Image (cartoon, rainbow, N blue to C red):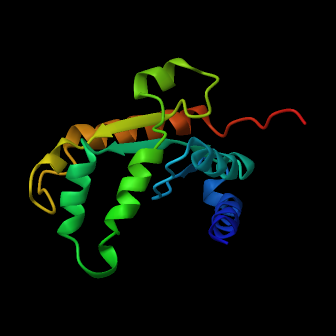
Amino acid sequence: AALSRVRAALLEGRRQPKMEDRPLVVLADDNAAYRSMRHVLYRVARDAGCAAATVYVEVPSVEDALRRNAARTGKDRVPDASIRRMAAQLEPPPDSAAAAASSSSWERHAATIRNATCSRNAAVDEAWPPESAIREVWRVVGAARAAGPPERPPS
């Protein structure tokens, strides 16, 4: 259901006159632990004629993620078992440099942001995200937009 709404929104956005000649970039705030999950999002963007980029925020350790999560309350708090399971299953995207070097990889527009601030005990670090992380995200988004929508494979 969520992917159907994303597809519809992307297709509607492409029909807007001011967007006809500007490649869109899909930014999905999702855990997408498996590479196959990210590939589904990539295909949705590609099929809608949009560019796609991946931004991966790396947490130093499961313990850091659990400590940060413990400071959350209510619906914002995730069960510890879910965090441990996702950490065990995680298939991170290729490193930014490796992804960029592989022009055939569908994840070639990927940025890895190393979240060293998680190692602190604070629930929210005032310095996050650092300017360098923001620059890296915009660099990858800019590269994806410049490359334009990926071509569909021949059928």
Nearer to the camera, 68 or 110: 68
Q: Can you name the residue that lies furthest to the top here?
A: 101
Q: Nearer the viewer, residue 20 or 80?
A: 80
36 vs 81, nearest the viewer = 81
Q: Is residue 116 above or below residue 102?
A: below
Q: Residue at x 70, y 48 (%)?
A: 49
- Which residue lies most toward the right here? 155
The image shows residue 136, relative to residue 41, as above or below, that is above
Which residue occupies the foreground of this view, 17 or 95?
95
Q: Which residue: 81% across, 34% down?
A: 153
Taking the spot 90% from the left edge, 36% from the top edge, the residue there is: 155
Q: Position of residue 98 (x, y in %)?
A: 46, 21
Give residue 154's position: percent from left, percent from top: 87, 32
Task: Judge from the rendering whether residue 7 lies leftward or rightward of residue 22; answer left or right.
Answer: right
Q: Residue at the spot x=24%, y=64% of the render? A: 69
Q: Compared to 12, does 119 lie above or below?
A: above
Horizontal side of 120 relative to 102 (left or right) equals left
Viewport quadrant of the N terminus = bottom right
How many labels sit on residues?
Answer: 0
Judge from the rendering whether residue 98 lies leftward or rightward of residue 23; answer left or right: left
Q: Residue furthest left?
A: 121
Q: Percent position (x, y) of residue 24?
A: 58, 50
Give the x, y percent position of residue 148: 62, 37
